[in-house]
Image: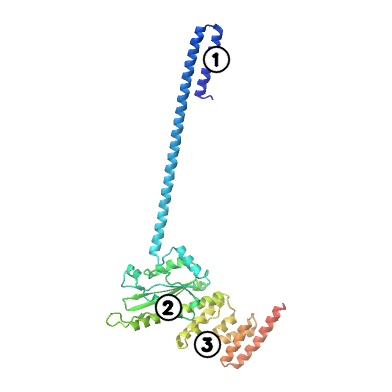
Amino acid sequence: MVSAGLFTGLSGLSGNLLTLYKIKQDGSFRDQQELLHEIRELEAGNAQQRDLRKESQAFRNRTHEATVGNFYEIERDWRQARIGIEVKAIQEKMDREISDSPFPYTNDDFYALVHDATRGGEIPALLVAPFVRDNLSGQENADGPHSFRVAIRRKWLQSSWSSDLVSLDGALKRPLTSTDVDIFHIQRALRDLPVILVYGEVQSNSRVWPALCAWNIVDSPEMRSVQVNFPPVILPEVNQQSLDQNSFLAFEDELGGSTAIVAGLIAEWFHLVKHGRIPRLHNLIPETLESERRVIAAGLAASFEVALERGRVDFVSARVGQASVYLDVGLRDQAVSAAHQALDATESGGTHVATQSVRRLAEIMQALGLSDEAYRARLALESAARRAILRNFGWGNR
């Protein structure tokens, strides 16, 4: 369809052509001049109308462009405002999480810190939280002084087994005032990393309730986490008239030593089950701590059961390891029982047995004064060595 403007232009042009044709026909000069004047007037009017139409269209175009530009600017301003609101909300959420959490990092930053320190979980992390005092407010607990943290850290660093864990002192900024919730927050942030956390509460400035929580130490459904609640211990007098500074420091040192031993025991479980390392903690503790060494030995013997369950060691090696630990601390009856189980399994020949385990079994039997059993163990060692050689040559288990 021809537009209205174009149709008007065509009609005007056709009229002009007809008029010119008329001039040529009648030959009147006067009429020609008048007609030419009318034509010029008509053309001027048509040109003015065209200019008006152009200006009108240009105005409409400018109005449309201004409307589009305004819409874009409004949309841009709205997007920027919305982004600013979302960023502010995220920042406020992060600030609240950091303010409420027991560590001064975001969850991701805290995980990255512990992940790097533990080489991706190849060694457990040791975290020590300042102890909570129930007679102080949350802010007063946060401000300090942070009780027992120094003693626990120093005792750990002075221990002969300090390399079994990575100490991250200062990773926790305040006591665990919301104990269970704070522990859950730490566990959720560190997820799959092996961690041993020491914390505690001071009740009425009179007694201390130490505790230890560990997780991801042993990959076992029955041992996802380990909780150790120490019995309460009485604080020395703290009023200024009777305060004995030396006795108070001695109390802190004793508390630090106890937590270092328990943390070391749990670390032994980790290194045996994950890396197959033979336990050594019971031999690193001073012999004067006889009762502590025996308790540790019982815990290490239990770790062999976990390692056996997880397939880290075979049955004979587990029983030989238990017998060796019991023998080291003077628990003869337990050592004899474990050694006999290992000997029976070795002689049965039902499974492949590591020759070093059988060799150690013969030494244990001899140390226990069981000459006949030691002789049987040496015969079993010869048989195990012979089977190992045959297997190496691909001749089967003969």
The circle on residue 44 is none
Q: Secondary structure at mark 2?
A: helix
Labels 2 & 1 near each other (Cβ < 8 A): no
The circle on residue 17 is 1
Q: Secondary structure at mark 1?
A: helix
Quarter residue 71 falls in: top left
Q: Position of residue 149 (x, y in %)?
A: 39, 75
Of residues 235 and 87, the one drawn nearer to the viewer in this rendering? 87
Residue 183 vertical placement versus 238 (above, below): above
Looking at the rendered structure, the kind of residue marked 2 is: Arg
Residue 270 vertical placement versus 39 (above, below): below
Q: Position of residue 163 (x, y in %)?
A: 50, 77
Looking at the rendered structure, the kind of residue marked 3 is: Asp
Q: Secondary structure at mark 3?
A: helix
**Disc 2 crowd, CA 10 A, few/some/many (<14, 14-19, 20+):** some
**Disc 3 crowd, CA 10 A, few/some/many (<14, 14-19, 20+):** some
The quadrant of the rendering that contains the C terminus is bottom right
Q: Position of residue 99 (x, y in %)?
A: 38, 63
The circle on residue 154 is 2
Of residues 127 and 217, the one drawn nearer to the viewer in this rendering? 127
Looking at the image, tell me whether mark 2 or mark 1 is earlier in sequence order: 1
Looking at the image, tell me whether mark 2 or mark 3 is earlier in sequence order: 2
How far apart marks 2 and 1 lie (CA) works out to 113 Å
- In this image, 140 relative to 198: left or right? left
**Disc 1 crowd, CA 10 A, few/some/many (<14, 14-19, 20+):** few
Q: Position of residue 144 (x, y in %)?
A: 34, 71
Looking at the image, tell me whether mark 3 or mark 1 is earlier in sequence order: 1
Quarter residue 59 falls in: top left
| Residue drawn at the location 46% of the way across and 32% of the way down | 61
- Give the mark toward the camera: 2 or 3: 2
In the picture of the structure, the residue carrying the numbered disc 3 is 328
